Image (cartoon, rainbow, N blue to C red):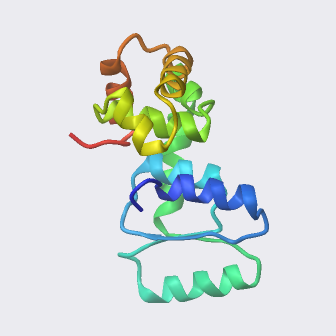
């Protein structure tokens, strides 16, 4: 998905159709991704490395309005809960960003300029600047470098 990831797509689907059942079938088991997907409201999370029978069971579960999570999910959740007390203000603050602010944040962290972001998101450069200001304030960042470091720590961009 070129302009949206699974987390963003899940949020949008749930916003417009809360009764939808969202299935994530992925090769990614990164802790932050899984936690964010849970928070976004997925119904099924299955890894591509899991046996095919797990996917079939998951599809049956979601058809019956149940949920199903990969055998990896409990391990990931336990690791998350162990570090819960150590959660930083930065992580708390990231959750307060709107969907548009997250899009702008990611593009800024990737090193794109204000004009390029405005063109890509079909908004004015002034609006991008406004989002940039709000993002930096919410995340207590003082520079684009700070935003890039946050994005790397959250595994939103790779270096």
Residue 28 in the image: above or below residue 32: below
Residue pushed farthest top? 142
- Image point (41%, 77%), residue name: 50
- Image point (41%, 40%), residue name: 119
Q: Is residue 106 visible?
A: no
Foreground residue, 70 or 23? 23
Residue 102 in percent (x, y) is at: 51, 37
Apparent side of residue 65 relative to residue 107 in the rendered image (left or right):
right
Apparent side of residue 26 relative to residue 19 in the rendered image (left or right):
left
- Image point (65%, 68%), residue name: 43
Location of the C terminus (image quadrant):
top left
Residue 57 in percent (x, y) is at: 58, 86
Residue 95 in the image: above or below residue 79: above
- Image point (77%, 62%), residue name: 18
> How many numbered markers are drawn?
0
Q: In the rendered image, which quarter is residue 100 located in?
A: top right
Residue pushed farthest left? 159
Location of the N terminus (image quadrant):
bottom left
Q: In the rendered image, which quarter is residue 62 located in?
A: bottom right
Q: Is residue 97 visible?
A: yes
Residue 90 in percent (x, y) is at: 50, 23
Foreground residue, 100 or 11? 100
């Amino acid at each position: 998905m070129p302009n949206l990831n699974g987390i963003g797509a899940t949020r949008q689907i749930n916003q417009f159709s809360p009764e939808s059942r969202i299935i994530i079938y992925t090769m990614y088991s990164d802790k932050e991704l899984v936690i964010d997907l849970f928070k976004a409201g997925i119904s099924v999370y299955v890894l591509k490395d899991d046996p095919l029978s797990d996917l079939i069971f998951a599809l049956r579960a979601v058809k019956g309005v149940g949920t199903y999570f990969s055998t990896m999910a409990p391990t990931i959740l336990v690791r998350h809960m162990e570090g819960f007390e150590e959660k930083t203000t930065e992580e708390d603050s990231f959750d307060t960003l709107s969907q548009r602010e997250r899009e702008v944040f990611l593009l800024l962290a990737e090193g794109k300029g204000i004009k390029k972001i405005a063109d890509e998101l079909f908004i004015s450069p002034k609006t991008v600047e406004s989002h940039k200001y709000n993002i930096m304030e919410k995340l207590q960042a003082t520079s684009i470098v700070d935003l890039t470091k946050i994005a790397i720590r959250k595994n939103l961009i790779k270096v």
